[in-house]
Amino acid sequence: MLRTSKILTLSLPPEMAKQIEKLAKEEGMTRSEFFREALRQYIRRMRWEKIREYGAKKAAELGIKSEKDIEKLIDEYRSEKMTK
């Protein structure tokens, strides 16, 4: 039979392990479910952080410093589209 998951070993300080046990119990989760959800959220946050970094880089390249700058670019774009 093929496993659908990979088993990992994790070492935690005793106090943190107690906190995890308590939180998992409060959430009605097993430790594995708790860690899977925590890791999903971490991965999602890291993806959004990369998107924000990309956006900040592009904004700097375009000289965007405020929402007014964005509105101005949108208005300019719309004006160009309507004149074509």
Image (spheres, rainbow, N blue to C red):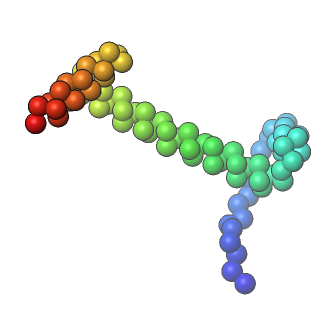
Task: Quadrant for the N terminus, please.
Answer: bottom right
Residue 18 image position (x, y, % from top left): 87, 40
| Residue 43 located left or right of residue 12 | left
Front residue (pair 80, 20): 80
Residue at x 84%, y 43% (from the top left corner): 27
Residue 67: horizontal and vertical position, in percent? 36, 18
Which is more toward the observer, 77 or 21? 77
- Of residues 12 and 20, the one drawn nearer to the viewer in this rendering: 20
Q: Between residues 63 and 69, which one lies in front from this camera angle?
A: 69
Does any portion of residue 83 appear in the rendered image? Answer: yes
Measuring from the top left, give residue 69's x and y in whole percent: 29, 18
Quadrant in the picture for the C terminus: top left
Give the vertical position of 46 relative to 31 (above or below).
Answer: above
The correct choice, above or below, for 23 with respect to 57 in the image is below
Q: In this view, does 13 lie to the left or right of 54?
A: right
Residue at x 49%, y 43% (from the top left corner): 47
Q: Relative to 64, is 5 on the left or the right? A: right
Question: Residue 42, located in which quarter of the rendered image?
Answer: top right
What residue is drawn where x is 77% and y is 48%? 34
- Report x, y in % for residue 63: 24, 21
